[in-house]
């Protein structure tokens, strides 16, 4: 009987295992996760779970009974410490080796922590990636306390929004010249910065954390690169993630900003596949790695089909979202290579969207509380169509009637 092991019990791993069964795989199927709980959603950790709006049971992707009913052996709190690709055996941290016929690596990504010299890993200094991280810092969110958030990406900003909503004093530092510099245009950075400052968040851009000491058992003294010193109660580090490739590297797989896979999810070893945050794949003549729930699910399901010989090349349709205060920021496409941004006011006050173009070609859209702009732009991007920039800039032109570039050429 064929045995497939899926290593990494997150969004991608759960989706891949479920898809294998849905496609008719009737062999032995083992889903292995290092965390002591069933697969769960990560995005709500820095949003609704941290704010108390979502309880633990709602985090789980599927009830535990699902795995039993579909004969998926779910091993939680279990760590694979090595893969022998020649013999297709898994070395386990606690327990005997497991022999398999195929492997899917869905190991996700690991948070980048502060260096140990600056207190990384010490009590009161947190990252936001796992359920354990969220639970460990829950007691810190008491009104009036002061939190320092290091990193002005989406994770840091979402944590800042929750903390401010709960009545904490929030200081966020970003070493780059502006927040969201790696992923968004100045227009989106400006909009999000104004949102946070309106809620009392102290955002300091072009400002890094130089030193962090603990003069007593209850507070930290943070020295910033702007010369200021802050006394804070705890620290959240949100400076990004790295693809979790340690197992793949030990197995000799090719690495290129993640586990290098082809359009079918196959690694440099034919019987080992990868999907989700840990994998880089071909896309429009280049190679990308996407950190998003939609990609984790879609790529995992496409890879499952490939493992069974039923696959087609995976074509990513990137989209993302972020919840901050009462704003849902929805992002369609990838903005890499843009040379101009068109701002379009939304139909309701306080809403708008930013449309990224390379020449006349639409690449991506950031929509702030503007779901219509998001949905329309997403359809256009996925269809490979581009609206005329003058029409995008004119709010009098309805979204559904935006003339396309090819229309103008005709």
Image: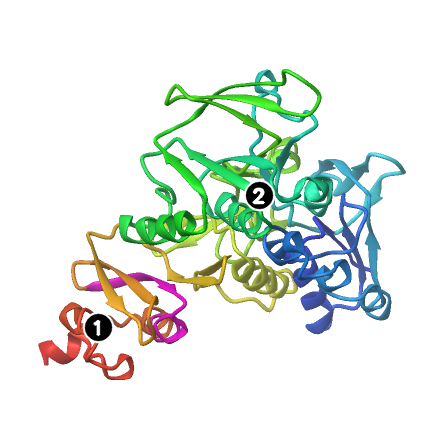
The residue located at (66%, 57%) in the rendering is 41
Determine whether, in the image, residue 378 is placed left or right of residue 272. Answer: left
Which residue is painted at 66% across and 26% down in the image?
121
**Residue tagged by mark 1?**
387
Question: In the image, residue 261 lies at what x, y percent?
Answer: 52, 48
Disc 1 residue crowd, few under 14, some 14–19, many 20+, Cα 10 Å:
many
Give the alpha-carbon distance from disc 2 to disc 1, as whole Å.
Answer: 43 Å
Q: Cβ–Cβ below 8 Å for labels 2 and 1?
A: no
Q: Is residue 355 left or right of residue 240?
A: left
> Does the magenta portion include 204?
no
Label drawn at residue 170: none
Which of the pair 50/288 is nearer the observer?
50
Using the rendered view, name the quadrant where residue 39 is placed. Answer: bottom right
Residue furthest front as drawn: 144
Residue under label 2, please give it. 168
Seen in the picture, residue 235 relative to 76 is either above or below; the reply is above
Query: Which color scheme is applied?
Result: rainbow
Residue 67 % position (x, y): 81, 64
Q: Nearer the viewer, residue 382 or 135?
A: 135
Q: Position of residue 228 (x, y in %)?
A: 42, 21
The percent coordinates of residue 260 (x first, y second) are 51, 44
Instruction: Classify mark 1: helix, strand or loop.
Output: loop
- Give the mark nearer the N terminus: 2 vs 1: 2
User: Given the current orientation, which residue lies at the most extreme left position?
Assistant: 409
Q: Give the residues drawn in magenta, as a range.
A: 361-377
The quadrant of the image that shows the N terminus is: bottom right
Q: Nearer the viewer, mark 2 or mark 1?
A: 2
130 over 42 or under it: above or below? above
Identify the element where label 2 is drawn: loop
Hey, which residue is sitting farthest right in the picture? 95
Relative placement, left or right, of 387 versus 46 is left
């Amino acid at each position: 009987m064929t045995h497939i092991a899926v290593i990494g019990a997150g969004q991608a791993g759960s989706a891949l295992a479920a898809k294998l069964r849905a496609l008719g795989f009737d062999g032995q199927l083992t889903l292995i996760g290092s965390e002591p709980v069933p697969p769960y959603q990560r995005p709500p950790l820095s949003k609704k779970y941290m704010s108390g709006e979502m309880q633990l049971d709602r985090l789980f992707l599927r009830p535990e009974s699902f795995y039993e009913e579909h004969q998926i052996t779910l091993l939680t709190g279990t760590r694979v410490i090595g893969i022998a690709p020649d013999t297709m055996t898994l070395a386990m941290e606690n327990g005997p080796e497991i022999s398999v016929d195929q492997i899917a690596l869905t190991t996700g990504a690991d948070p980048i922590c502060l260096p140990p010299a600056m207190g990384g890993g010490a009590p009161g200094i947190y990252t936001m990636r796992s359920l354990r991280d969220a639970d460990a810092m829950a007691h810190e969110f008491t009104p009036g306390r002061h939190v320092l958030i290091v990193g002005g990406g989406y994770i840091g900003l979402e944590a800042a929004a929750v903390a401010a909503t709960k009545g904490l004093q929030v200081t966020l530092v970003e070493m780059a010249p502006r927040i969201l510099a790696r992923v968004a245009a100045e227009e989106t950075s400006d909009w999000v910065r104004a949102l946070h400052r309106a809620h009392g968040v102290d955002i300091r851009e072009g400002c890094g954390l130089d030193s962090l000491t603990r003069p007593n058992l209850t507070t930290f003294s943070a020295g910033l690169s702007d010369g200021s010193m802050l006394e804070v109660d705890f620290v959240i580090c949100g400076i990004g993630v790295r693809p979790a490739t340690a197992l793949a590297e030990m197995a000799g797989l090719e690495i290129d900003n993640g586990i290098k896979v082809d359009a079918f999810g196959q690694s440099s070893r034919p019987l080992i596949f990868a999907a989700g945050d840990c994998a880089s794949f071909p896309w429009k003549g280049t190679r990308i790695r996407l950190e998003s729930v939609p990609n984790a699910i879609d790529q995992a399901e496409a890879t499952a089909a490939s493992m069974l010989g039923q696959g087609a090349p995976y074509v990513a349709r990137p989209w993302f979202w972020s919840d901050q205060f009462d704003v849902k920021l929805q992002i369609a496409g990838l903005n890499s290579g843009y040379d101009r941004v068109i701002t379009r006011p939304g139909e309701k006050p306080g809403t708008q969207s930013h449309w990224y173009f390379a020449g006349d070609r639409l690449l991506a859209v950031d929509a702030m509380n503007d779901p219509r702009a998001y949905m329309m732009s997403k359809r256009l991007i996925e269809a490979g169509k581009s609206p005329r920039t003058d029409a995008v800039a004119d709010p009098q032109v309805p979204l559904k009637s935006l003339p396309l570039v090819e229309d103008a050429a005709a």
